[in-house]
Image (tube, grey):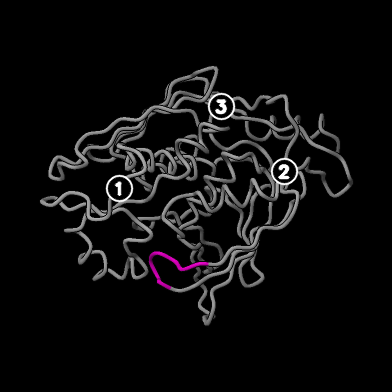
Amino acid sequence: MGSNSLSAAFNSLKSSNLISWKSTGTLQQTLAGCIELMGKTLHSGKVSMVKIWPGFAGEGRYFEFQSKLIPACIDFAQESPLCTTLCKDGYKIRTVEHLLSALEARGIDNCRIQIQSFGSEDPEVEVPIFDGSASAWVEAIDKVGRKEALDRCGNNAEKLAPYLNEPLHVSRNDSFMVAFPSPKVRISYGIDFPKVPAIGCQWFSSTAFGDFYKKHIASSRTFCIYEEVEQMRNAGLIKGGSLDNAIVCSASKGWLNPPLRFHDEPCRHKVLDLIGDLSLFASPGSQGFPVAHIVAFKGGHSLHADFVRRLSGII
């Protein structure tokens, strides 16, 4: 199947009144080699290994875990606290958002992501957290490089992007996301922690791709409130959390492990998460993040997933 017929297939399947799939003017990309990284995980505290292999055009990004294939797609996203989880046939892959954020932002449209947890045969695995940012993934992607992706018949394929045609919004309590049609990707993200003065109310505006992502978003680390740590650990979360893989802020004492990489690092990290979560809208080999101006306030993984489901017509 050539690029023109692939484009026609995508458009016929996915375009709707809400979204139009249009050419980016570029060809689908994949990795020029294999990436292999190992590290401790945030919530389970176990060590896992990830190998990312070049993929065929039109097959998109997908995980391989215990011989099961799980597409990085909203159809397999499951509600889970403090992370994004993919689930299929009882097999779960947790904390995928930082890896997917880096792949989406650096233009890796097709790849096979093998993952395994050392010393465990559980049907659940988690992506390593590293320093709590996407820097390790971006550095590994940039080191191995990109190349044009070919399908199984040796043909290249056009890369498409979803353009928003009309405003869209979702909300949960006092959190909301709204998107407006725009000729290019724009993000405006706000957070508000009135009981934690060192964070307070922050806003950050950005694009999602290119060097801006690498310089201004990728290195922002996940953050947590010190007074909530015990509650999270009692819930079986952040067993692998430490001052080495998150920035921790106390309501009374401020940041416990300064310095911050940016004065608004928590807000930037929310943008990092958003890019990873919205990548789940991708058709195989296409851009997942919608071409729109997206405004989010006090969002999180559940709200991001609601937004993608609304885009997909699931809710």
Where residue 282 appears, x then y in whole percent? Answer: 60, 40
Where residue 130 appears, x then y in whole percent? Answer: 46, 60
The residue stretch that appears in magenta: 39-45
Quarter of the image with the N terminus is top right
Mark 2 is on which residue type? Answer: Arg
Which secondary structure, mark 1? loop
Q: Mark 1–mark 3 contact, CB under 8 Å?
A: no
Locate residue 282 relative to residue 241 in the image: left or right: right
What residue is disc 3 on?
Answer: 19
Which secondary structure, mark 3? strand
Q: Main SS type for the magenta part?
A: loop
Q: Residue at x 13, y 52 (%)?
A: 253
Tell me the CA gap for discs 3 and 2.
28 Å
Q: Using a 10 Å C-alpha cutoff, classify the residue at mark 3 as few (fewer than 14 neighbours), some (14 to 19) or many (20 or more).
A: many
Q: Disc 2 or disc 1, which is closer to the eye?
A: 1
Where residue 187 appears, x then y in whole percent? Answer: 43, 28
Mark 3 is on which residue type? Answer: Ile
Q: Residue at x 58, y 49 (%)?
A: 139
Mark 1 is on which residue type? Answer: Pro
Which secondary structure, mark 2? strand
**Residue 291 falls in image quadrant:** top right
The residue furthest front is 259
Query: Which of the two discs, 1 and 3, labels the residue nearer the N terminus?
Result: 3
Label annotation for residue 259 = 1
Locate residue 39 relative to residue 148 in the image: left or right: left
Query: Which of the two discs, 2 and 1, labels the residue nearer the N terminus?
Result: 2
Q: Is residue 44 magenta?
A: yes
Label annotation for residue 146 = 2
Q: Nearer the viewer, residue 225 or 291?
A: 225
Tell me the CA gap for discs 1 and 3.
42 Å
Tell me the CA gap for discs 2 and 1.
33 Å
